Amino acid sequence: MYESIHSARILLRGDERCNPRFTQEPEYRSDGASTVTGWMRPDSPEGVAVKPALPNLPFRITIPANAGAAEYQRINVEIWRRLQKGESLWGLNFAPPPTSPQSATGAGLLLGALAFGAILGLAFNSKN
């Protein structure tokens, strides 16, 4: 029997001190992007050796749909950089913004209204 595992569980990394530990199942958006949530825990030998103990750092990261190794390399570099500088890992978003059908419909309505106005303008100008 096969079980589907999110690619972040395999490819997401921390730094030499911290490793990701997931606390929730991934949340999927309609465009296929997913959000993973958990803690970066200092549970490597280097992380455990640090005194005073390093805190667990919460993370919430949005991963693009069909992210491959190259995309995870970019994500992991940013995570590493933030861990080294002590910056937050909450709310990182690497996915392109979702496109909403409403914005496409709104643009279509605007274009239709402009075309209708142009036709009416031509019709009134041709009678004069």
Image: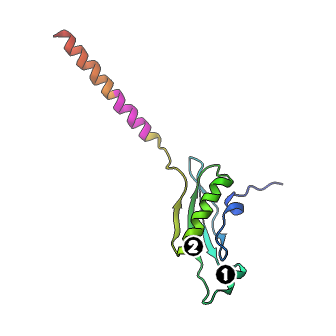
Specify whether 40 is left or right of 105. Answer: right
Q: Amino acid at mark 1?
A: Gly
Task: State which quadrant residue 21 falls in.
Answer: bottom right
Query: Which residue appears at 60% of the width and 90% of the height?
Result: 52
Q: Which residues are magenta?
A: 103-112
Instruction: Point out which mark residue 83 bears.
Output: 2
Secondary structure under the numbered disc 1 in the rendered image: helix
Quick one: label 2, few (<14), some, or many (20+) residues within 10 Å? Answer: some
Locate the C terminus by quadrant: top left
Instruction: Point out which mark residue 47 bears.
Output: 1
Q: Amino acid at mark 2?
A: Leu
Locate the N terminus by quadrant: bottom right
Query: Which residue appears at 39% of the width and 35% of the height?
Result: 107
Q: Is residue 37 above or below residue 100?
A: below
User: Looking at the picture, how far across and down is residue 66, in whole percent?
Assistant: 65, 49
Query: Which residue appears at 56% of the width and 47% of the height?
Result: 30
